[in-house]
Image (cartoon, rainbow, N blue to C red):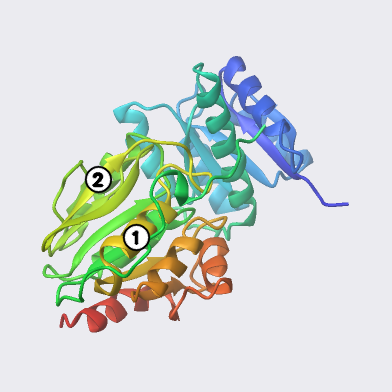
Amino acid sequence: MKKKIRVLVVDDSALVRKTLADMLSSDPDIEIMATASDPFVAADKIKNEIPDVITLDVEMPKMDGITFLKKIMTQHPIPVIICSTLTDKGTETAFKALEYGAVEIITKPKLGTKQFLEESKVRLCDSVKAAARARVKRISPRRKVEPKLTADAIIAKPTSRAMIETTDKIISVGASTGGTEALSVFLEALPQDAPGIVIVQHMPEHFTASFAKRLNMTCRVTVKEAQDNDTILRGRALIAPGNYHLLLKRSGARYYVQIKSGPLVSRHRPSVDVLFRSTARYAGANAIGVIMTGMGDDGAQGMLEMKEAGAKTIAQDEATSVVFGMPQEAIKRGGVDLILPLQKIAPAILRESGVR
């Protein structure tokens, strides 16, 4: 019998604890080990049994979630998912938690439409499954599911190759669990004149703007959250806004992006499959596709379509991936030309693009 993923839910709100527990318990592969109202109660629970995954609030009385996270990751690393509210303060605190070893950020579920609650449940359960498979490292003290849709729900599959190859390349990147750190390493290695980049990182709404600003402070390329009709330029990276699909478009010689709502695709919004399919359709051989660390198979089919359209395709290797799911699925489907360690992806792209 398959072993269930045992989860410890830590939140000072009884309503949130019950909501998270009910959502997680609805998945046959997950069970609630315990719930805790604060980190001290959680620490007592962990003394008796080690959970497979912890969901952790960041703003709690007695001890904040960041302090508790530090203690966990320096003493006995356990995969931790940060469950945060959509405030500016909460966003910044959640990103600090990622720096201390949390593997994922999710937003606290709230009352809404039935579709909203179902989508929240899908994201929550998938995040827990991804976290259970993640490679977590000890840090020093210093530091009812909706149908799984394909990209057909957003954009039709290309029926012919994109227009003739040009000298300018478009870099199309997809990432999920572990992707925030992977994207930092990748983007910081690129020069100011790097080809234009479009990115889907699975991340909640409102977090992507803060993520882009943080990257923009450390990278030579300009990094921003994509807005509808943004032109893709050399030396600029556009990140899909949370909760919206990002599509590549082309008008004459101009590449630009479209921001679009719609259903979850491959269980995500934004979806890597949607970005990759639009890249295959409008850029073809002018594109380079990169699929990075993440759980599931989002991007695998889209990467195959990119390769079939003439694009060069790269997957992050298993050794440097926090979760090897997305790259592995793309490799299995035959959509990958090169499998590279994270640190070698940027140099490979620059060589392929003719940038020195």
Would you say the residues marked 1 and 2 are in contact, meaning their CB atoms lie under 8 Å apart? no
> What residue is shown with label 1?
183
Quadrant that contains the C terminus:
bottom left
The residue at the far right in this view is 1
Q: How many neighbours does mark 1 have within 10 angstroms: few (below 14), some (14-19), or many (20 or more)? A: many
Residue 287, how many percent across, how many down? 28, 70
> What residue is shown with label 2?
258
> Image quarter for residue 172?
bottom left
Q: Is residue 29 left or right of residue 201?
A: right
Q: In the image, what residue type sits under mark 1? A: Leu
Q: Is residue 262 left or right of residue 297?
A: left
Q: Earlier in the sequence, mark 1 or mark 2?
A: 1
Q: Which labelled disc corresponds to residue 267?
A: none
CA separation in Å, label 1 and label 2: 22 Å
Q: Is residue 110 left or right of residue 205?
A: right
Residue 100, how many percent across, how many down? 44, 49
Name the secondary structure under disc 2: strand
Front residue of this view, candidates 257 and 124 = 257
Name above or below for residue 307 compared with residue 102.
below
